[in-house]
Amino acid sequence: MIAGTLNISEIFHSIQGESSFSGWPCAFIRLAGCGHGCLGCDTTYTEHETINLETEEIIRQAVAYKAPCIEVTGGEPLLQPAVYPLMERLCDLGHTVLLETGGFLSVDEVDPRVHKIIDIKAPSSGVCDQNNPENIQLALAASPAHRKSFEFKMVLGCRRDYEWAKALLLEHRLVDSFTVMMGVMFGKLEPQELSRWILSDRLNVRMQLQLHKYIWPPEMRGV
Ligand code: SF4
């Protein structure tokens, strides 16, 4: 039993759509609030219509879906200090726990058992100067066993984004040690085009589509 409450946007059951866990049924705990202001953010609704829930109640609802993984997402989940004991408790209970974070806060205090999916925002997000460089340094400094718990995600909207992303990956040699998921901003860049660039450059990232946006209407919530 752990004390504390979190401001929650929604808890739901869906198909994981944007990571190396893509395709798995997953219970999502979406924390409220972010305020980072990325252009094209598809979860601005997390700023409103929120509810305060006890940590144990959040765990009860998420676990009830009996999914093979539980993802803590947002909004920006790391803005709420009580998220740390929540993730730790879920790990203690034996669950595979994913964290999806916008990448402007450090993941330093996250339980090492949590699989960290860290966004690296590209220029057309409007906030790429706010990517936290500490996250790449933490990943590079991690032990070989712990490295597996880091993965990076880049969502691109144009060729300029792609060139920027490629330069960053090569500078830090991220694809040599980590899974890097690269995808398109829905409706902004054609997947075929990005595929062509990746193949032509022999860039060993994993191409991904936002699976949930192809299964359900792109604007639909709780999926
Ligand atoms: S970090 Fe994520 S939740 Fe926050 S504004 Fe950007 S896209 Fe939206």
Image (tube, grey):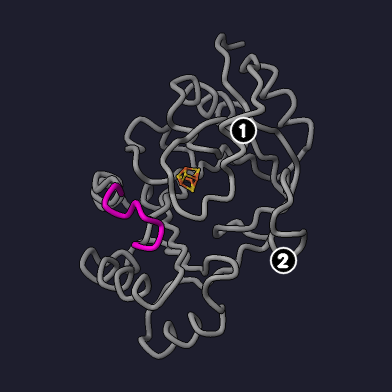
Q: Position of residue 202 (x, y in %)?
A: 37, 85
Q: In what element is the residue under mark 2? A: helix
The residue labelled by disc 1 is: 94
Residue depicted at 46% across the width and 43% down the height: 101
> Could you tell whether 135 is left or right of 211 in the image?
left
Residue at 48 percent of width and 37 percent of height: 76
Q: Is residue 177 magenta?
A: no
Going by the numbered disc 1, the residue's amino acid type is Gly
Q: Position of residue 4 (x, y in %)?
A: 55, 11
* Crowd rating for badge 2 (residues with CA inside 10 Å; few <14, some 14–19, many 20+): few
- Can residue 129 be found in the magenta stretch? yes
Mark 2 close to ligand 1, CB under 8 Å: no
Q: Is residue 206 above or below residue 116?
A: below
For numbered disc 1, what is the local secondary structure?
A: loop
Q: Residue at x 51, y 68 (%)?
A: 183
Q: Is residue 108 above or below residue 143?
A: above
Q: Which residue is mark 2?
A: 214
| Range of residues picked out in magenta | 123-131
